[in-house]
Amino acid sequence: MHSRLSPALLLSLALSLLPLQASALASIRDQEIAECRPGEIATWGDGRDRPAVAAKLVFVYEHRGAPAWISELLVMQLLERAVQAWAPCGVPAVVLRGVMTPALMAAEPGHIQVLWDEAAARGSFALANLTQRQLAISPAGFALLKQRNPRHPFQETLQMVISHEMGHLYGLMAHSRRCVDVTSYYHNGRGETCYARDRSQLKSVTEYRSMLPTACDLQRCRAANGKNGKAGP
Ligand SMILES: [Zn+2]
């Protein structure tokens, strides 16, 4: 199964939204990230959540093909940060550096290949493929981001797309309709938009979607993996 975050959509948002306003406005976003209120979990209904691709996830990162300005150390740090942020879901996961051959992939059913691969990313910034246990990142997507919006911190976009695509591998197949969730889509292309506690907040930051899983992302993840009542917060 596949899912995508459109570079065009992200770029248009990054280019059109206003710079950070008063910090009091941003704090509502922070609250939405930290707290999932009853009734706030809603999806676009575009997929059915399921358990993670394996009971224990091993993300294996291969740096070959990465854009020259993106270091291996940085990507490893972003992967580590995403795995730590998903940890409250209750599915154990680690990040390693390495090269996965088809034979190794067949021998290690919990291993997930993380790589830079234009074809596998299929026009998105990144794409999770659950069948192949692959998280493919697009070199061209990040080249376009740098070219079109050089002042935008690409690390934040990379962190967000890694966290988002990891969410699919953790079993979150439907996209969230709560704007701030890392698994969200802002709109469905048919005039329907995502939810926020205060929609005026959406323009308070360049990117409203969280870079890391939110309380609602984690709650959905625990439910998808039968971990409710076991893991906090
Ligand atoms: Zn997605």
Image (cartoon, rainbow, N blue to C red):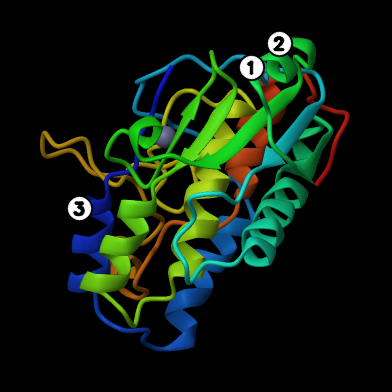
Q: x%, y% of residue 110? A: 76, 20
| Marks 2,3: beta carbons within 8 A | no
Q: CA distance from mark 3 to mark 1?
A: 32 Å
Q: Residue at x 78, y 12 (%)?
A: 107
**From the viewer's perspective, is 48 left or right of 93?**
left
How crowded pointer 3 is (Cα within 10 Å; few <14, some 14-19, many 20+) is rated as some
**Which amino acid, by three-letter code, is at mark 1?**
Pro
**From the viewer's perspective, is 125 left or right of 158?**
left
Q: Is residue 8 above or below residue 103?
A: below
**Which amino acid, by three-letter code, is at mark 2?**
Ala
Q: x%, y% of residue 106? A: 71, 10
Q: Which mark is residue 106?
A: 2
Residue under numbered circle 3: 8
Q: Is residue 134 above or below residue 29?
A: above
Front tag of 2 and 3: 2
Q: Nearer the viewer, residue 70 or 22?
A: 70
Q: Secondary structure at mark 3?
A: helix
| Marks 3,1: beta carbons within 8 A | no
Residue under numbered circle 1: 102
Q: Is residue 145 above or below residue 223?
A: below
Q: Secondary structure at mark 1?
A: helix
